[in-house]
Image (tube, rainbow, N blue to C red):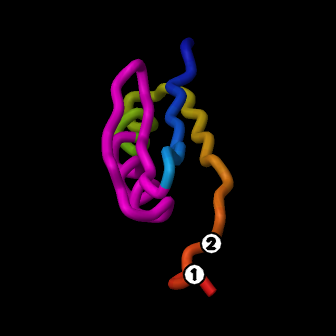
Amino acid sequence: METAVYEVVSRGEEWFVLHDGDEAGPYLTKEAAFEAVVPPISLTIQDGLPVQLNIEGGQKTPDEN
């Protein structure tokens, strides 16, 4: 069974979600990108597939203090 891999990555000050060669975004924050990836991950889990989520580290924004 192939693992579905989702990645939350930054490019400059924007965040994107990558999966199977597709890209969603841009999102203003890492948290917004994470919230956007939860529904498709949930559907993948419901389909019985294993899931891997990679979230890139990054600098805190002023709102995260």
Query: In the picture provided, is 24 more to the left or to the right than 60?
Result: left
Q: Residue 19: give x, y in percent of width and height.
A: 43, 28
How far, Cα to Cα, is label 1 from label 2?
6 Å
**Disc number placed over residue 60 in the picture, else none:** 2
Residue 34 in the magenta stretch? The answer is yes
Tell me, yes or no, whether the two marked residues, 1 and 2, touch with CB atoms within 8 Å: yes
Residue occupying the point 39% across, 37% down: 46
Q: Quadrant of residue 59?
A: bottom right
Q: Residues within 10 Å of mark 2 (few under 14, many from 20)?
A: few
Q: Residue 39: give x, y in percent of width and height.
A: 34, 49
Kindly identify the amino acid type of the residue bearing the numbered disc 2. Answer: Lys
Residue occupying the point 50% across, 59% down: 30
Query: In the picture provided, is 62 more to the left or to the right than 44?
Result: right
The C terminus lies in quadrant: bottom right
Kindly identify the amino acid type of the residue bearing the numbered disc 1. Answer: Glu
**Disc number placed over residue 10 in the picture, else none:** none
In the depicted structure, whether residue 20 falls above or below residue 29:
above
Q: Residue 38: give x, y in percent of width and height.
A: 41, 51
In the depicted structure, whether residue 17 falls above or below residue 63:
above
Range of residues picked out in magenta: 13-40
The N terminus lies in quadrant: top right
Q: Secondary structure at mark 2?
A: loop
In the depicted structure, whether residue 27 falls above or below residue 3:
below
Q: Quadrant of residue 5?
A: top right
Q: Residues within 10 Å of mark 1 (few under 14, many from 20)?
A: few
Residue occupying the point 32% across, 39% down: 24
**Which residue bears the numbered disc 1?**
64
Residue occupying the point 52% across, 47% down: 10
Q: Residue 48: give x, y in percent of width and height.
A: 46, 28
Residue 18 in the magenta stretch? The answer is yes
